[in-house]
């Protein structure tokens, strides 16, 4: 497989030697050093496949004396199909947390399927972006329509999201006024929006989620229903509203790409417009397309981006350590936007492999340390299942109850279809633990319902029952006479490390003072699953 | 053998000793606090008619026009103020109700209009605007110097998992606490083990996090504080507010039967226990067919609890500081469609307010006789939000920062309907 052979030569050279030096020099802060093997394995497992390593994986990795074992472990996990699923879920959230219409919630599954499939097949990021920008077809079967669906076909909102997601440029700030801090003029936003006025969502009533189709509408604007709030909707060309008199028709805008000045004549068909802008956005020489992805992945993996906002960059903002960003972005573009290779490159860096240090207690210091992150909802869910030894397919699907089914009318079928999908345990968990991954991570805080769910949920309580033979704890207790061994195993299953001597003593003391061995270890298991350390990736 | 025996009081002492009580207040004292808070703080109950209630079959009957659809108007206890026939109980408290008959908007799709009527803003991918409940709770808390009481500050009852608006840019701590219905305890609020064991678990958790706390002191401290808050909540006396069995039978009977009635009663109990904002959802108002018959049925479940809630709050001296809002996404078409239904109509619709300093017994604005155009005193959605702010002593110009660094005012350029006060 050629793509796995790709080695970012310039990049590796830089990363291995020069970059650590650059970073240290630039910030004046001493790097904290490289993290230990157990931390490293837990970090790459959570980052790549969305869960902690298993006790077996930990043993094997710690026992491995090879000097290249870190690279080998990254290589192995990158080849796991769960890598594609994990990152499909991440980008699903990037897109759907910004939906302006809840009817698009059902896109979660089709979008996840589309992305996982493409990432697993090593499609270049540029191809994936093009498919999403030019998407048409039945929404429930074409996950690539998700950006359009999330904005329910609104011209300006689609333009804003395409720019934000694929270029990290928030040009929509210029929708109503010239951008306050950046160079973008109001006219440039509307010229960009002019690539999308012919995108339309057809809805066949009564078919629920299956009734939505993204289509090109190049003829007969009268066929399209004009909305009272947007009298210009349904026109074949995009118009920039007259701010002084919104009742006026406004100025018809010609499609023009603000970064390059490339343009199309008025009257160009929808597909020609979207194919052109997709090609221009994803072009190898558009540095912002590569930087947007690198900034995102770096921020997620190293814990801190080059730009403060993962999706708010652009030529008028200042990056920290821009030389790393440029090297990586160039390497990403040169590789043909190979996503998997980019993960390998970032994870090979010292910045990634540094020990971690709190983002709250320390100033941004040019990547001197890896910043711990609260796990994303999907990572936490997978990690809990792994800890209690339950396969996701075994988790009960608590679909709508009888009373809810009875109330189901034809008219509300789509909301119900959406809700059925939301009723699977992972999605219900996400309703409590999910957050918009594009938000600054220091703003993501825990909530009371989260604490309540982990403390008191009945399924979890059953899963850690020490008296039942089918639970992981029940089996551990039956197989191990030694309390010390059980405590060790519980630590490995949850925190993916051995307990310290103090922690071991605390656990054993607790068990000794409990009514029974089972109860004592249930408490230990509960405490580990509820601990802050379990919820963070460090 | 158990190493120690631990009561709830002991727990509270223990948590308190751990230094998290401070300004937050403790379970045993929460009822006292709540009485105290009510004197200083404002509260709000939103009665949300999911689907868009017909103005003509509720509080804006059209007597002398075919568009009235044959619905009769009835007199209220205020001379000249008439309601649709399905609202006899509300008619008896009309002197406490102010009806705005000139609401007008352009948003006719459910999710967008629901977002608009909950946040005062149209949805926009670059920022999630905070829902009214989160605005009210966070502002009440900032008046009082922080989050108060053990119960969640915002509670939403019966929204069936729809999540069209949350705390958004205000942060998750102000997200509505969701209840499926008022009859059951909220999810995951029963400890799975006895209280003393639960406490020992928490203590163990904290001790096992000590090593990690050396690496991330702030994050671990926040985590521990969150668990203590959650524990304090589920063990607090305030949780009794969720138990409607606690209420005298006579009061329950006065609120009437059904989920919405239970929701209204629970809303009053929660406000009484220090919660700042409760939303109670009534579902099914999207009456595209058989509108009149459907509204009659729906009103049957809302009329009595609504009227009782207003009266009950007044009796307890809470009405002056508690704003009660009755709204939905939009109104419905003046012309009855061939299926006997009315479709979405944002151009003119209605809203009802009570309490919170609003003078009852008055009607604001009017439409033409066909019920189509607002002809007097149009009230836009931001105006309605500015009105909420005025009632609740909230400064609508307070700004919060969107992720893009753009400041967003609580209310975007609306002007309060001053005649209401």
Image: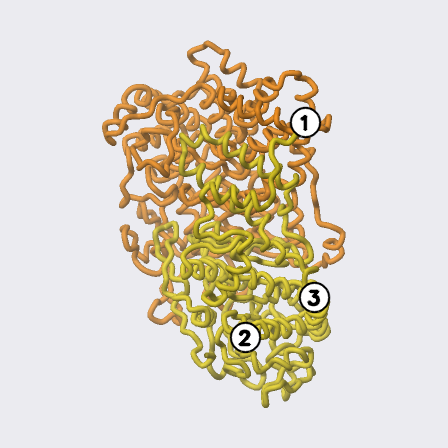
Chain colours: A orange, B yellow
Q: Which mark is residue B255?
A: none
Distance from Cα at disc 3 to Cα at disc 2: 25 Å
Q: Could you say where residue A526 lies in the image, as x and y percent from the top left?
A: 59, 33
Does A148 sit above or below residue A231?
above
Q: Which callout, 3 or 2, points to the residue nearer the camera?
A: 3
Q: Can you tell which quarter of the image residue A297 is in? A: top left
Instruction: Give the SS element for disc 2.
Output: strand
Q: Which subunit holds the residue at mark 3?
A: B
Whether tag 3 and tag 2 are in contact, CB under 8 A, the answer is no
Does A76 sit above or below residue A390?
above
Q: Horizontally, is B89 left or right of B418 in the view? A: right
Q: Could you say where residue A132 lies in the image, as x and y percent from the top left?
A: 49, 43
Residue named by callout 1: A516
Residue named by callout 3: B248
Distance from Cα at disc 1 to Cα at disc 2: 58 Å
Residue named by callout 2: B354
């Amino acid at each position: 497989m050629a793509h796995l052979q790709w080695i970012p030569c310039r990049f590796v050279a830089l990363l291995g030697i020069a970059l650590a030096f650059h970073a240290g020099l630039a910030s004046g802060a001493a790097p904290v050093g490289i993290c230990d093997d157990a931390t490293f394995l837990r970090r790459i497992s959570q980052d790549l496949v969305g869960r902690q390593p298993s006790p077996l994986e930990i043993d094997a990795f710690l026992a491995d004396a090879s000097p290249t074992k870190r690279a080998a472990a990254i290589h192995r996990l990158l080849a796991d199909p769960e890598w594609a699923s994990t990152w499909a879920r991440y980008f699903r959230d990037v897109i759907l947390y910004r939906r302006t219409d809840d009817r698009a919630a059902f896109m979660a599954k089709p979008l996840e399927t589309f992305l996982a499939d493409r990432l697993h097949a090593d499609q270049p990021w540029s191809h994936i972006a093009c498919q999403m920008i030019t998407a048409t077809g039945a929404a429930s079967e074409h996950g690539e329509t998700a950006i359009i669906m999330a904005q329910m076909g609104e011209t300006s909102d689609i333009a804003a999201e395409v720019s934000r997601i694929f270029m990290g440029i928030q040009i929509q700030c210029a929708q109503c006024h010239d951008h306050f801090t950046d160079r973008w003029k109001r006219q440039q936003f509307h010229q960009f929006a002019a690539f999308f006025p012919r995108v339309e969502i057809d809805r066949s009533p009564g078919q629920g989620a299956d009734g939505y189709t993204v289509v090109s509408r190049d003829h007969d604007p009268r066929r399209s229903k004009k909305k009272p709030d947007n009298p210009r909707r349904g026109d074949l060309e995009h118009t920039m509203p007259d701010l002084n008199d919104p009742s006026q028709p406004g100025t018809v805008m010609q499609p023009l790409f603000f970064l390059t000045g490339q343009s199309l004549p008025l009257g160009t068909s929808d597909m020609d417009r979207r194919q052109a802008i997709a090609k221009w956005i994803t072009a190898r020489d558009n540095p912002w397309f590569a930087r947007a992805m690198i900034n995102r992945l770096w921020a997620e993996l190293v814990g801190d981006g080059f730009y403060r906002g993962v999706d708010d960059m652009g030529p008028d903002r200042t990056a920290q350590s821009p030389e790393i960003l440029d090297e990586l972005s160039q390497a990403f573009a040169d590789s043909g936007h190979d996503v998997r290779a980019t993960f390998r490159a970032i994870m090979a860096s010292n910045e990634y492999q540094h020990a971690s240090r709190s983002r709250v207690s320390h100033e941004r210091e040019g990547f001197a340390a890896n910043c711990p992150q609260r796990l994303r909802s999907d990572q936490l869910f997978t990690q809990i299942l792994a800890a209690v030894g339950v396969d996701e397919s075994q988790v009960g699907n608590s679909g709508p109850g009888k009373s809810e089914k009875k109330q189901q009318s034809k008219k509300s079928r789509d909301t119900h279809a959406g809700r059925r999908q939301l009723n699977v345990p992972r999605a219900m968990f996400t309703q409590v633990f999910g957050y918009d991954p594009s938000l600054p991570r220091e703003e993501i805080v825990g909530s009371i319902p989260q604490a309540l769910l982990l403390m008191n949920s009945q399924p979890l309580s059953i899963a850690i029952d020490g008296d039942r033979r089918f639970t992981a704890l029940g089996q551990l207790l039956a197989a191990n006479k030694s309390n010390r061994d059980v405590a060790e195993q519980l630590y490995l299953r949850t925190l993916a490390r051995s307990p310290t001597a103090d922690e071991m003593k605390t656990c054993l003391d607790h068990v000794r003072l409990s009514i029974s061995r089972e109860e004592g270890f249930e408490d230990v298991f509960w405490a580990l699953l509820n601990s802050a350390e379990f919820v963070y990736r460090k | 053998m158990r190493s120690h025996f631990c009561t709830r009081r002991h727990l509270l002492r223990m948590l308190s000793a751990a230094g998290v009580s401070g300004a937050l207040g403790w379970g045993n004292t929460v009822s006292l606090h709540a009485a105290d808070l009510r004197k200083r703080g404002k509260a709000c109950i939103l009665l949300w008619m999911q689907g868009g209630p017909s103005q003509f079959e509720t509080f804006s009957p059209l007597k002398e026009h075919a568009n009235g659809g044959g619905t009769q108007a009835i007199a209220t206890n205020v001379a000249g103020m008439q309601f649709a026939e399905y609202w006899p109980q509300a008619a008896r408290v009309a002197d406490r109700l102010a009806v705005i008959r000139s609401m007008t908007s352009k948003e006719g799709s459910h999710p967008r209009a629901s977002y608009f009527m909950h946040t005062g803003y149209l949805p926009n991918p670059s920022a999630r605007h905070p829902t009214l409940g989160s605005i009210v709770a966070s502002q009440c808390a900032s008046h009082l110097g922080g989050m108060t009481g053990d119960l969640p500050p915002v509670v939403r009852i019966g929204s069936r998992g729809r999540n069209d608006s949350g705390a958004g840019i205000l942060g998750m701590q102000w997200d509505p606490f969701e209840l499926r219905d008022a009859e059951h305890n909220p999810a995951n609020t029963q400890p799975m083990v006895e209280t003393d064991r639960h406490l020992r678990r928490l203590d163990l958790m904290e001790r096992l996090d000590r090593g990690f706390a050396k690496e991330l002191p702030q994050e671990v401290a926040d985590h521990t504080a969150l668990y203590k808050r959650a524990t304090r909540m589920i063990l607090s006396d305030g949780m009794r507010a969720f138990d409607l069995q606690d209420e005298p039978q006579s009061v329950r009977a006065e609120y009437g039967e059904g989920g919405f009635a239970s929701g209204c009663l629970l809303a009053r109990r929660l406000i009484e226990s220090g919660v700042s904002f409760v939303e109670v959802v009534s579902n099914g108002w999207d009456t595209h067919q058989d509108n009149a018959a459907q509204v009659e049925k729906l009103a049957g479940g809302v009329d009595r609890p609504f009227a009782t809630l207003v009266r009950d709050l007044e009796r307890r001296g809470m009405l002056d500081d508690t704003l009660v809002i009755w709204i939905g996404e939009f109104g419905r078409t003046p012309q009855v469609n061939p299926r006997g239904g009315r479709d979405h109509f944002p151009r003119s619709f209605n809203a009802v307010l009570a309490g919170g300093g609003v003078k009852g017994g008055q009607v604001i604005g009017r439409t033409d006789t066909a019920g189509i155009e607002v002809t007097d005193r149009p009230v836009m959605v931001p105006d309605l939000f500015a009105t909420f702010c005025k009632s609740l002593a909230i400064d609508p110009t307070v700004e919060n920062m969107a992720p893009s660094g753009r400041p967003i005012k609580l209310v975007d350029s609306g002007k309060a309907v001053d005649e209401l006060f």
